[in-house]
Every structure is written in C-alpha cells, then in structure tokens.
Image: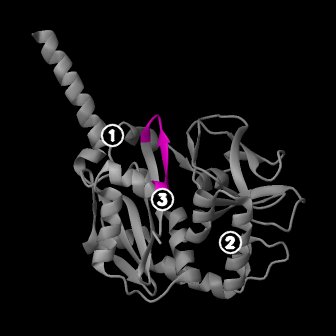
Amino acid sequence: MTRFYTLFFLLFSILVNTASAQFTYQNLYVDYQGAREYRQLRIIPIRAKSGFLDSNMNNNINRFNSTITLQDAMDRDLIDITDREGVNTLRFTNNSNQPVYLMSGEIVQGGRQDRIIARDVILEPNARNVRVPVYCVEEGRWGNNSKYKYYHEGSMHLRKKVDRDQSQSAVWKEIEEENRNDGVRTGTKAYTAHANNRQYVQQENDYLQNFPISTFGDVSNIVGIVAMTGDMVMGCDIFVSPDLFQREYNTIIYSYIDEAVSFGLPLTISDQQVRTYMDNLLSNEATQRRFIQRFGKVFEENGRIIHITTYDNR
C-alpha cells in the first residue's frame, strides 16, 4: 500500500508540475487594467500567477534567471562572431561562464553584411563556434569584414518574415518596402540605415520615453506583453520567467515601437477584439498550438516552452 501511495503522489506531482508550466490562463493573466498607450501604440502586460513563478513547479525559472542577453554579451565583449560560411550562417563563441540567449529577430551590424538571427538559440557557457542560422538584412554589401555590434530587434513585420516565411528573398523584399515606406536612404539596402534617419529616430525615441518597463508598475510577475495599433493586435511575446522578460524587454520593445512608427494607425481596436485574440492563444494548449501554427512561433527546450511570439492574425 505504501508503494502504491508513493507512486500515486509521484505521478500527481508530475502532472501538477507539467500543468503549472503551461503558458495558459491557468498560469497567466492579461492585465487589461495595466494597459499603457502613446500615439498609435497600446501595450498590455501579461502577468504570471504564483504557481508559474514557483521554481519547484516551473523548472526553467532558475536556468533562465542566469542567462545573459545577446546585447549585454556583445556590449561586454563576451561574444565572438565569425563570418565564414556564406550568407545564412554565423558562428558564435560564448566567452562567458553563463548561458547567452540569442532571440529570433535580433540584428547584428557589421561583418561582411548585417544579419538578423533566424531562430532562438541558447549558447551554453564557454560554447565554441556554434552555427547559428541568420538572414541578411543588407542586400547590397558583401565585404569589409568589420567587428559586429548590436543593433536591436527588427520590426514585427520583419520578424514575421523571418519566423513565418523563412525566406531570404522575402526578408530582402520586406526591408526594401520598409525602407521606402520610412524614407530611409541606403546605398547597401541596409535595414539598419533606419538609425541614420533623424526623423525616424526621433519618433522612435519619443515612443521609448513613453514605454519604459517601469510604466507597467510592479514588474515582478510580468512575463510578456501584447501590443496593438489601429484596429488590430500586432502581436505578443511571452517568456518563461519575469527575469528573462525584464532583460529582453529593452530588445523586444523596439519591435513594437518600430511597427507603430512604420505602420501604425490611430487606435480603434475594441477590448473584445483583444480578448478574442488572447483567448485563442491562452485558453488551453490545444487552441494555443493551432494558433501558433498559423500566426506565430514557439521556442522550446527539452519539451518545455521558453518563449512564444505571435503576430497579427490577418
């Protein structure tokens, strides 16, 4: 009998732990009262319930509390990037004793040409020459192999092309359209030339000043955000822990701000439209899988979700 109860409680514990790690309403809630908006952008925080934050229930919490962002690693010269294998691969070496988290959509500027990371990757401590898939975001240059520096995340439009289309030609076409739309002039067809457009950068900075992470109040349980412009949800990002979200916030916020600057419209979306979008994502695992298959991507490690990104569902 003792053996039976031991087995029962072991199985029960496994079920509870698995359930608690779900990215659903069981563990998360959308803080509609905490919404903030400026001009053509509204952002709503997504918060975790207590069970999701329990390290005994969510086994990835501790692991990802020790990771370094790509920006931090590059700023501290902890990463070496080599450019020897053509357009769509870079090799990364992690010179630190902590994991480094590379996120799909992050842009590194320099090398033979600017590149955008094509999928989420974890560089283990002291990992050497890890091949990372990338796309070119500077079609008109190949050469002058300078040291790479960090840019930031691409717009939601560009990230969607990277994650959903997974096509170099689609990425180049998107950049050409965005540069033309934003009045960006560049001899090498570089997406990063946005940084040289004074008017664009001023708009970007105006939004940045209105969306510091502190604008959402208590950030200790925020694991993601959902953003909207005009009459549509532009997308959302949700992470496995508040710590990881906080460190990645200064990167992902550029995606939503640049989307608002480039494609934003006056906010007319209804609360019900937003709730319907989030219901499709968070109601249960089955509907979540279907929604992500159509409109997003998910990064998993050992079968556990680390990061969900979704885009507009039109």
- Comparing labels 1 and 2, the label whose residue is closer to the camera: 2
Residue 202 image position (x, y, % from top left)? 60, 85
The residue located at (68%, 45%) in the rendering is: 132
Q: Which residue is mark 3?
A: 294
Amino acid type, mark 1: Asn
Residue 285 image position (x, y, % from top left)? 33, 48
Q: Specify the quadrant that holds the N terminus.
A: top left
Residue 58, numbered circle: 1
Q: Say if the magenta span includes residue 302.
A: yes
Q: Is residue 296 above or below residue 122?
A: below
Nearer-N-terminus badge (3/2): 2
19 sits left or right of 305 in the view: left
Magenta extent? 293-304
210 sits left or right of 80 in the view: left
Q: Quadrant of residue 106?
A: bottom right
Residue 276 image position (x, y, % from top left)? 31, 69
Tell me the element at label 3: helix
76 sits left or right of 243 in the view: right
